[in-house]
């Protein structure tokens, strides 16, 4: 795991060293790649789950409706980019 972490740190450091515009180009390229976008979506889901873990429960339908709105906004971002 140390090698994976080291590689991740090198990539992150390189990304942070880029200008804001260059960072955007890299991130949009990642979003445009189907496999990497799926990975980002999985990470996003994990972040959402972690954030929700300490909150009171709510009806499933309300949660699904909220997620659909969130995902449709993300889809619009990808469509606008293309």
Image (tube, helix red, strand yellow):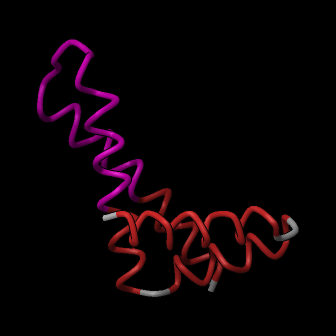
Q: How many marks?
A: 0
Rendered view: 74 above or below 39 = above
What stretch of residues is rendered in magenta? 42-71
Rendered view: 72 above or below 19 = above
Q: Position of residue 54 (x, y in %)?
A: 26, 17
Q: Is residue 74 left or right of residue 3?
A: right
Q: Is residue 47 left or right of residue 54?
A: right
Residue 42: image quadrant is bottom left
- Residue that appears at 62% across and 64% down: 12
Rendered view: 9 above or below 49 = below
Outermost residue, left direction? 60
Q: Say which of 8 and 42 sits in front.
A: 8
Q: Which image quarter holds the N terminus? A: bottom left
Rendered view: 23 above or below 51 = below
- Residue that appears at 35% across and 84% down: 35
Q: Position of residue 51 (x, y in %)?
A: 34, 29
Q: Say which of 65 and 16 sits in front.
A: 16
């Amino acid at each position: 795991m140390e090698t994976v972490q080291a590689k991740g740190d090198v990539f992150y450091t390189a990304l942070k060293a880029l200008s804001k515009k260059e960072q955007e180009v890299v991130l949009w390229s990642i979003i445009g790649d189907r496999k990497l976008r799926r990975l980002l979506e999985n990470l996003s889901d994990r972040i959402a789950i972690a954030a929700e873990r300490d909150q009171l429960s709510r009806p499933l339908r309300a949660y699904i409706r909220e997620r659909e709105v969130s995902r449709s906004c993300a889809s619009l971002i990808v469509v606008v980019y293309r």
